[in-house]
Amino acid sequence: MSVVKINAIAVPEGRGAELEVRFSARAGEVEKMPGFEGFELLRPTAGETRYFVYTRWESEEAFLAWVNSEAFTRGHAGPPADLGEGGQPGSGGHPGLSASGPVGTGSVLLEFEVAQRVVKAE
């Protein structure tokens, strides 16, 4: 049974684009992990101000292996200290961090098991 982990990140008004750029430049370590099934960065629209980082895993064990891995540590490390203001794409560091500090002001991890799933038939 797949599990879903959603990191709900509070981002100050006007800094969402910066967070999106940082995610586009992220290290990409999670895609290499056994049991990883998918990733989405969800931009808030009506009724919500937080960004949601959605990941899906084949099992809780696969997710825990990721969290406890060296790849997780690399993927969540801050960018090198010599980056300019705001961090630049390709830094390889954690998307929420830069030489100028974090974009997110807080986060909450939401956890789910997939009870039902429907995919579009091709």
Image (cartoon, grey):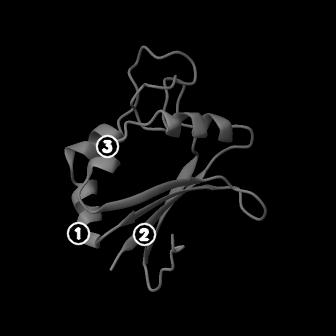
Residue 69 placement (x, y as % from top left): 21, 50
Q: Name the residue under label 3.
A: 29
Q: Which residue lies furthest to the bottom in this view?
A: 115
CB under 8 Å between callouts 3 and 2? no
Distance from label 1 to label 3 (Cα)? 17 Å
Q: What is the three-letter code of the residue carrying label 2?
A: Val
Residue 16 placement (x, y as % from top left): 67, 41
Dot 1 alpha-carbon crowd within 10 angstroms: few under 14, some 14 to 19, many 20 or more: few
Dot 2 alpha-carbon crowd within 10 angstroms: few under 14, some 14 to 19, many 20 or more: many
In-front residue for pair 23/31 = 31
Residue 69 left/right relative to 36: left
Q: Upstream in the sequence, badge 1 or badge 3?
A: 3
Residue 90 placement (x, y as % from top left): 44, 25
Q: Name the residue under label 2.
A: 4
Distance from label 3 to label 2 (Cα)? 18 Å
Q: What is the three-letter code of the residue carrying label 1?
A: Glu
Q: Looking at the image, which residue is at 57% across and 24% down?
A: 86
* Kind of element beneath mark 1: helix
Q: Is residue 121 above or below residue 6?
A: below
Q: Mark 1 points at which residue?
A: 61
Q: Residue furthest right?
A: 46
